[in-house]
Image (tube, grey):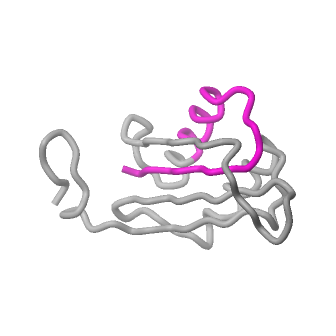
């Protein structure tokens, strides 16, 4: 934890670089070690948001450390710059998960 799941209708050329960069950003925004950030990218997804222009849906899950009102702007800026998605075509869903509901290394965190 945290986990970021990105789905976009656009094609991402350098997927590994994007995943590394978004992991660094999420680590910084949540003040959690990068070694605990997991990132997933699904590009060229069948997404529709008002029309067929490029769009993006992002899910961010974490045990605490989420501050959506402070995180949404830098994440949207990142996606706009790196994937060329207009910020009005990006949805982000934040979810604070109880430690008892998050497993890793054969146990839960709480």
Q: Is 24 situated left or right of 35 in this image? A: right
- Residue 21, by quadrant, is top right
Q: Residue visible at 73% across and 48% down?
A: 78
Image quarter where the C terminus lies is bottom left
* Residue at 18% across, 39% down: 105
How many marks the image carries: the answer is 0
Q: Tell me residue 43's x, y (percent).
A: 66, 42
Q: Is residue 13 magenta?
A: yes
Image coordinates of residue 99 in percent, x first then y, are: 23, 62
Q: Is residue 8 magenta?
A: yes
Residue 38: horizontal and vertical position, in percent? 43, 41
Which residue does the image show at 44% across and 38% down from the upper left? 34
* Quarter holding residue 58: bottom right
Segment colored magenta: 1-25
Of all residues, the one furthest to the front in this rendering is 46
For this view, does 81 lie left or right of residue 23? right
Q: Is residue 9 visible?
A: yes
Q: Is residue 74 visible?
A: no
In the rendered image, residue 41, in percent from the top left (x then y), is placed at 58, 41
Quadrant of residue 75 within the rendered picture? bottom right
Residue drawn 70% across the image and 26% down it? 14
């Amino acid at each position: 934890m945290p986990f970021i799941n990105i789905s976009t209708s656009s094609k991402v050329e350098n997927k590994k670089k994007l995943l590394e960069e978004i992991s660094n950003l999420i680590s910084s925004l949540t003040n959690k070690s990068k070694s605990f950030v997991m990132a997933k990218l699904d590009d060229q997804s069948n997404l529709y948001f008002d029309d067929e222009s490029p769009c993006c849906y992002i899910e961010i899950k974490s045990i605490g450390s989420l501050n959506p009102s402070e995180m949404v702007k830098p994440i949207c800026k990142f996606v706009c710059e790196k994937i060329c998605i207009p910020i009005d075509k990006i949805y982000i869903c934040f979810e604070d998960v109880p430690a008892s509901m998050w497993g890793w290394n054969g146990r839960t965190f709480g």
